[in-house]
Image: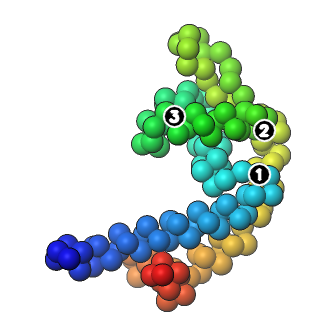
Amino acid sequence: MSDIHQGNLYQLIWATRRLFQCLSTLGDALHQVHGNTTRMCVVLEFLDREELKTVPQMASKRNVSCQNIQLMVNELIEKELLEAVENPAHKHSQHIQRTAKRRSCFAEVKQREAGPLAEIATEFSDDGWGLPSRRYAICVST
């Protein structure tokens, strides 16, 4: 293994990847009640902050492929959580927006997340790096 794989930066990157995976698994468990995945919730949250975006605009901001976003948008449209509306600026790229059903569903999701996220927040140190305590370090090291 090269020196780059032994240093603190690599260890931080590895821990970040594992923590991301742990949080994604937790998110999937919390959101399965509504049949959503964490990745779907990311799209919904994005539209909370950036109303009326096209799929290519969302993909560009998230640095993922249009196909990736389009798959999630299609599922969320089927669940009536999002809807496609006319985009006067582009004939073939519709705007995607939230529905009333999505607003009520998402309020419940936020409430379900509050407890676990508050618990996770207490596990991070206040050393300026925001590194997890030993409990979450064990999660990311496995």
Q: Is residue 41 left or right of residue 79?
A: left
The numbered mark, 1 or 3, whose residue comes first in the sequence reads 1
Badge number at residue 79: 2
Residue under label 1:
35
Identify the residue shown where x is 73% and y is 72%.
Answer: 115
Answer whether labels 3 and 2 touch (C-beta < 8 Å). no
Whether residue 104 is situated above or below residue 126 in the rendered picture: above
Which amino acid does the dot numbered 3 rest on?
Answer: Gln
Whether residue 90 is situated above or below residue 63 in the rendered picture: above
Answer whether labels 1 and 2 touch (C-beta < 8 Å). yes
At which x and y percent is residue 58? 52, 35
At which x and y percent is residue 54? 55, 27
Identify the residue shown where x is 73% and y is 58%.
Answer: 31
Residue under label 3:
67
Badge number at residue 94: none
Secondary element under disc 3, as helix, strand or loop, is helix
Please rate how many residues cluster around mark 1, counting C-alpha atoms within 10 Å: few if below 14, some from 14 to 19, many from 20.
Answer: few
- Real-space Cα separation, disc 1 to disc 2, in angstroms: 9 Å
Depth check, front residue: 119 or 6: 6
Please rate how many residues cluster around mark 3, counting C-alpha atoms within 10 Å: few if below 14, some from 14 to 19, many from 20.
Answer: few
Identify the residue shown where x is 65% and y is 62%.
Answer: 27
Q: Quadrant of the N terminus?
A: bottom left
Identify the residue shown where x is 64% and y is 35%.
Answer: 73
Residue 49 placement: quadrant: top right
Secondary element under disc 1, as helix, strand or loop, is loop
